[in-house]
Amino acid sequence: MSELNDRRWNDVEDVVRDLLAGPGPTSDMIANGRARLLAELHAATPHPPRPAQPPAPPRTARPTGLPQTTRPSGFPQPAQHAAPSQAALRRNGARPVRLVEAAARHDGAPPEPGPARRRRGRGRLAVALAGGALAAGAVLVVTTTVVLPNAQRPEISQTAIARPAARPILLAAADAIATAPTEGDYWRVRKVIRSTMVEPGRAYVLERGLSEEQWLARRPGGQGWRISRELGTTPATPQDETAWRAAGSPSSWRYPTDVSGLNATSDEKVKTAPDAPEATKLTGGWRGSGGTLLKQAMPWAELAHIPSGPDELRAYLEGRITAESVSGDLEPRLREACMQILRGLAVAPDVRAGAYRLLATLPGMRADGEVTDPLGRRGQALSYEVEASPGQMTEVRFVVDPRTGLPLAEETTAPAALADGRAVELRHSTSYEAIGWTDDRPATRG
């Protein structure tokens, strides 16, 4: 027992590595896991000792195996792994608590406890892990059996659930996006924008829809296009629809010059009926470019020189930020530049992968788990804060498909109030239907 008690926390990493048959967890994962395990162990309280029981009769049947955990969408399913070796944890230098192997054998049955193991009263640690889940940012479910140091130890099962981490999700997306297609006549970005706005009289909330396509011609002299279409504006909720009907069911709204708190544009007019698509030729700096980076149109030749390694990409972006003489913290601007690359800059797949890997090194990104985006697609959500106005921060939720590495949506919210005092939340979302190369042709009428 003293030998086990003297082993260090690094044994936990050995257990996880044996279970996953792959690279060990990161230092952040180990630290979070230790903290949660300690919290569970300290929460255990002793019960009255149980009366001695006669030895159990020999087993005639074996259980089918350990329970399976649920993995977030987009990650590969786990494979079966052999039982790990034993590991020991030290509990604040006081009462030792042993965490003993309890992984299933290949036939699904846990190992039979021997007499010596029963005499020593060791507990079992059942770690329900899906293979590769840590590397992909999945939720980790750990079930522990706490063993107290008295002669007859009651067993107390506790479950700790750790929220997914942002870094493994970003790295999984980087690996996926690195295999994206690299050929096509046009770089196409197609998106749907939805935003809620307070109607000019501040009586209810409206939701406006807009679709937009950007077609950037790769060949020299090719013509690029932007195709947009108003999808219509309607009351945002049933409650807003009731207020809209009470106001006479208007079919259009004209906004004033002062639109403070309305989430609208000055002198803007919106209407309930959708419009036909409108195609516009790209001119000026957009002609012959592959998108914008840090507010500058990027010619195709310049895009070819953007490095893909995260360190080299960081140095490149820092140089562009410094050249623009932009004041303020550097890391938020680095993050925004990476997001611009991912949202639609026509760079090579390894550069987009580098943007994900650079994001994984920046602070402030949090994982929110699996969500449904505004178009009904499932993806992993990552949240971070941006400065919407001087001194005012707002949260951005970025949804990514880890199977492809493609962005699905970005969403922001802001509080507002109606004339009757009702508090509302105004949302703005951009959902990406397509990002990448295509040999299709834009549907233009000219």
Image (cartoon, rainbow, N blue to C red):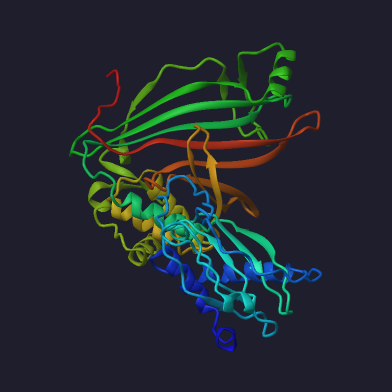
> Which percent across, then down, holds residue 86?
51, 75
Q: Is residue 377 left or right of residue 97?
A: left
Q: Quadrant of residue 39?
A: bottom right
Please indicate, yes or no, whether residue 25 appears anywhere in the rendered image: no
Q: Quadrant of residue 262?
A: top right
Q: How many marks?
A: 0
Assign the N terminus to one quadrant of the image. Answer: bottom right
Seen at 21% across and 34% down, the residue is 222
Seen as rendered, the residue at the extreme left is 220
Please indicate, yes or no, whether residue 170 appears anywhere in the rendered image: yes
- In this view, 157 is above or below 344: below
Q: Quadrant of residue 391?
A: bottom right
> Which percent across, then down, holds residue 84?
46, 70
Seen at 61% across and 74% down, the residue is 118
Seen at 28% across and 33% down, the residue is 224
- In this view, 259 is above or below 104: above
> Which percent across, then down, holds residue 445?
29, 18
State the residue in front, 443 or 376.
376
> Which percent across, then down, holds residue 343?
41, 44
Q: Is residue 155 left or right of residue 216?
A: right
State the residue in front, 306 or 221.
306
Assign the C terminus to one quadrant of the image. Answer: top left
